[in-house]
Amino acid sequence: MIVNETLTRVVELRREIHRHPELGFQEHKTAEVVERELDSLGIEHRRVAKTGVVAFIRGSEAGPVVGLRADMDALPITEESGEPFTSENSGVMHACGHDAHTAMLLGAARILQAQRDQLSGTVVCLFQPAEEGPGGALPMIEAGVLDDPPVSAIAMLHVDPRLETGTIGITAGAIQAATDEFAIEVIGRGGHGAHPHLAADAIPAAAAMVLGMQNIAARETDPLKSVVVSIGTIEGGYRNNIIADHVKLTGTFRSHDVDVRDSLEARARRILEGIARAYGVEVRFTVDHGYPPVVNNAALARDFADYMRAHANIRLVAPAPTMGGEDFAYYAQRIPGLAIRLGIRDEAKGTTVAGHSSHFRVDEDALPIGVETLVKFAIGVCDRSIIPQPIVEAVVE
Ligand SMILES: [Zn+2]
Ligand SMILES: [Zn+2]
């Protein structure tokens, strides 16, 4: 289905972007690669959100407006993948596949642009910065990318080494988690290690808080509504015989359900303040809210899966949700959205390593499957085989 010329170009672009990875909001060269390619294809585009690019493929007739989104940023990791096109920007690596996402969207744009005389409607291609943080989706939305023209549905692809090459994953409902960070400061009173009764020891209070926080997931949340409470750092104390007056802990909350998410801060505060009182210390607790959960629109997931079964020879699976985060969530809060997983797992090639590892690699044989999936989503919506139902009560943040 994908002609060789497009495929060769997608691989070329992916390797070029892979060689020159850039962190969030520093995607200057990547955005230039995207713009140069769009120019060569005669596709109209503009800059948004510092290093973001939005492009418009206008069909010969009016019709639905459909969005396709790729993320462009890399991670602060030193590459050890052994690929011949390894990162030339030391300490930065495309370890999450965003190089492949960008190249596949450019491939889809090439095909859609070539077919635009048969297209009724407009395809908006969103090349987004800073998915890995601090988040480029909201600035793109604030720049109006969903409004002018008004986009009726949006899809994205993410490479997934859990799924075999040759498959795509479509799962309805919450598939990725809200990512909220928290910090706990325990303030006691220092003293000599030999005279604990004259001090207020922050260390046992902090230890009780670590255990007490687990109660949120273990005892207080419906086990069918996933929640993670992880404490990642703990710092405090001076030496073996000094009572610590201060301990700092940081961690992350992950959740799929919006009501559960909204309850986490108050629950944690109740537990922490109760423990602080019991141990005679003070506690300061702060939560920094990150991305909301990614919720795949159920009707859109069903209709696109049906469409792919009828119009493509690609194996469909419904992978389990994960507790990872993804700022595609912001688009999918506003309009029907679909985050599609793209299988890249090939045992023989060794493309089995999870993202965010210095050894992460992508099976490039998956790229044409991703391009075809994006093209089919755009065509399915434009020819009204797939009719997105607007979200009635958008929860927007
Ligand atoms: Zn990532
Ligand atoms: Zn990613």
Image: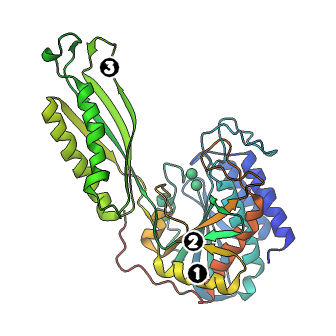
The amino acid on which the numbered mark 2 sits, given as a three-letter code, is Ala
Q: Position of residue 383 (x, y in %)?
A: 63, 89
Which mark is on residue 304? 1
Depth check, front residue: 211 or 302: 211
Position of the C terminus, as image quadrant, is bottom left
Quadrant assignment for ligand 2: bottom right
- With 127 as the anchor, is 227 left or right in this view? left
Q: Which residue is mark 3?
A: 237
Q: Position of residue 194 (x, y in %)?
A: 21, 10
Question: What distance separates the C-alpha of mark 1 from that of mark 3?
Answer: 56 Å
Q: Dividing the picture into quarters, in which one does residue 44 lie?
A: bottom right
Helix, strand or loop at disc 3?
A: loop
Q: Residue furthest right?
A: 4
Label 3 residue near ligand 1, CB within 8 Å: no
Question: What distance separates the C-alpha of mark 3 from that of mark 2?
Answer: 49 Å
Q: Dividing the picture into quarters, in which one does residue 111 lie?
A: bottom right
- With 24 as the anchor, is 348 left or right in this view? right
Residue name at image x 70 percent, y 76 percent: 314
- With 391 as the anchor, is 105 left or right in this view? right
Q: Position of residue 4 (x, y in %)?
A: 86, 70
Q: Earlier in the sequence, mark 3 or mark 2?
A: 2
Depth check, front residue: 360 or 62: 360
Q: Position of residue 335 (x, y in %)?
A: 46, 75
In this rendering, is residue 375 above or below 366? below
The amino acid on which the numbered mark 3 sits, given as a three-letter code, is Gly
Tell me if I can see residue 152 in this picture.
no
Helix, strand or loop at disc 2?
A: strand
Q: How many marks?
A: 3
The amino acid on which the numbered mark 1 sits, given as a three-letter code, is Phe
Q: Which residue is mark 2?
A: 155
- Foreground mark, 3 or 2, reads 3
